[in-house]
Amino acid sequence: MTNEPLNVLLLAGGVGGAKMAEGLQSNSNIMLTILGNIGDDDSFHGLWVSPDIDTMIYTLSEEINRKQGWGVREDDYKALSFLSKLGADTWMSLGDKDFGLHIYRTERLRRGDRASDITKDIAKAFGIEARIILPSDDIVQTKVLTDKGWLTFQEYFVKERCDPEVKEIKFEGLEVAKPTYEALDAISTADIILIAPSNPFVSISPILKIPGILEALKETSVKKLAVSPLINGKAVKGPAEKIMTSLGMQADAIGIASFYGDLIDTIIIDNVDSELSPKIRTLGIEVFCTDILMSNSSEKKRLAEEILFLAKNNNLPEGAKR
Amino acid sequence: MTNEPLNVLLLAGGVGGAKMAEGLQSNSNIMLTILGNIGDDDSFHGLWVSPDIDTMIYTLSEEINRKQGWGVREDDYKALSFLSKLGADTWMSLGDKDFGLHIYRTERLRRGDRASDITKDIAKAFGIEARIILPSDDIVQTKVLTDKGWLTFQEYFVKERCDPEVKEIKFEGLEVAKPTYEALDAISTADIILIAPSNPFVSISPILKIPGILEALKETSVKKLAVSPLINGKAVKGPAEKIMTSLGMQADAIGIASFYGDLIDTIIIDNVDSELSPKIRTLGIEVFCTDILMSNSSEKKRLAEEILFLAKNNNLPEGAKR
């Protein structure tokens, strides 16, 4: 390999994806492109909100509310207080600074600008060096079937706090959605493709299922790795294991590996799950174990470095946290 | 006269109109209807802002920032800070709570609701007992011709701080605007019609010029009074005298009386302008002098009481502040 920076493409959802992106962003030997999730997008009070993309932007620009993992630091809820006073349904927590971003995005969408271009401009304004790209400029929304009927993902996740059992997941709008040229180009020019420890069903699937994306991913022969979003059968954040159990799947790293199947050649799981490795290998997927929790910035950086080393050398570095 | 509450219709612009409305609102012997100004309305960041109507709502609900006379108390500018970071033009001061209201209004307008119904619901949510009605549900925008070309009123007033000389004023959209049935009904059922000490050219004119409004006002035979917005040739707030001078008019209570002409039968001017009374009477308009500054809530209340007494008795009360 040359000393040219490696093109790393990260498929990522919200909080977990943003942590992984942060670790990679700090590495000067790579060019990072993040293919984000638009399945959680929804309209609130007439404004278009893109929760996973926003979490990515706020995280990479250090505007993030670290305590929450989402939203903006030093934000307030004055706009929402007036909306509530006016009788609007305000279960979706939207801060004032956050509203500024949603107002900006919505105005540009109404003017006819592509969501991809708007995202690019927002990332630039926020001083983010990594490229954040979208799988599609069309609307593709994750819908979750529960006892309460079909819910948007935010209704299920925020309003219902993941309480109702998930019977089915669908991505509305897929049939007519077109992939962006940025996504297809990033896939075909990537040196490494990495799937972040995001929810495979509601964060990564809506990316993969955009017509043309999975095909493009399968066409490339570069190394494709995934980091498990489950540690000891539990999601670090969000409803992944709950959804897996509801859908009758095995809620552990084996279930994750089975789900991705031949899309990936390697999975990185946590040390605590090392006994699952033999079973995963029978699926034809290589397994490496390390500490994947990323509880602070040096952990994020360390994991990113280990993964990049692994991608180049087909093994974790000597000092990996085993 | 019976003891039935009097129907008082107040034609009002922003800050001065809201002060007058506040004084009247505190009077339990009347039913107050405010016919507000929509000429200052404009779109900011894709949201529809109605500055004069909002000032009225914030004032009558005591949400107003008393120090400014407009905007919301204990508000902040976090949304605007992100819009600014994103490169938006943020000369229009819009607070976070304020944004909540604009977001609400805009969403309902997009859904096809009438501006009148939205205003009614906002006033109700804010606990306002007076009726706030609009002259039209159509868009009628005040435009000001200056050296910098045609400006919207907010561009002239806020962005340019009333600095450029006004060469001409027009109200865009008048030709196709229809009056609301609420406005026509309020005019025909009013017992007293009062024009607030608002700018006649940019606050009251856009109301009067909506097709059908002036005609309806002229048809009624009830008492019609105006309170001068000028004291000693100066506007208490805003660019009234500047605009009058620019347009070659006499910038004093005589100019105001001439402007309204036979629309009103009585004008209330400040004690300091009492020497203008004879000249105003030659126009066929009755004049009464009192203290019209309204610098605090008891002053607002006192002026309202004096005007109501005057409307009933054709004279100011004995104790009027002469």
Image (cartoon, coloured by chain):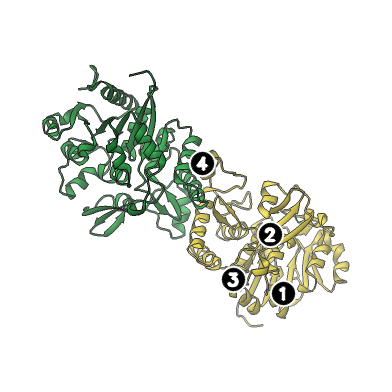
Chain colours: A green, B yellow
Q: Are marks 4 and 1 in contact (CB under 8 Å)?
A: no
| Image quadrant in which you'd find residue A216 | top left
Look at the picture and state if B13 lies above or below B76.
Answer: below
Sequence-first disc among 3 and 4: 3
| Chain letter of disc 1 in the image | B
Residue identifier under label 2: B142
Q: Is residue B318 left or right of residue A297?
A: right
Give the total of numbered labels.
Answer: 4
- 3 vs 1, front mark: 1
| SS state under label 1 | helix
State which quarter of the image contains the C terminus of chain A. Answer: top left
Residue A133 image position (x, y, % from top left): 40, 39
Residue identifier under label 1: B311
Q: Are marks 4 and 1 on the same chain?
A: yes
The three-letter code of the residue at mark 1 reads: Ala
Can I make out residue A144 in this image? yes
Residue identifier under label 3: B28
Q: Are marks 3 and 1 in contact (CB under 8 Å)?
A: no
Q: Is residue B202 left or right of residue B108?
A: right
| SS state under label 2 | strand
The three-letter code of the residue at mark 2 reads: Thr
Sequence-first disc among 2 and 4: 4
Sequence-first disc among 4 and 1: 4
Gap in Å between the C-alphas at discs 3 and 2?
A: 35 Å
User: Residue drawn at (88%, 71%), measured in percent from left and top?
Assistant: B282
| SS state under label 3 | loop
Gap in Å between the C-alphas at discs 1 and 2?
A: 31 Å
- 4 vs 1, front mark: 4
| Chain letter of disc 3 in the image | B
Residue A83 image position (x, y, % from top left): 46, 55
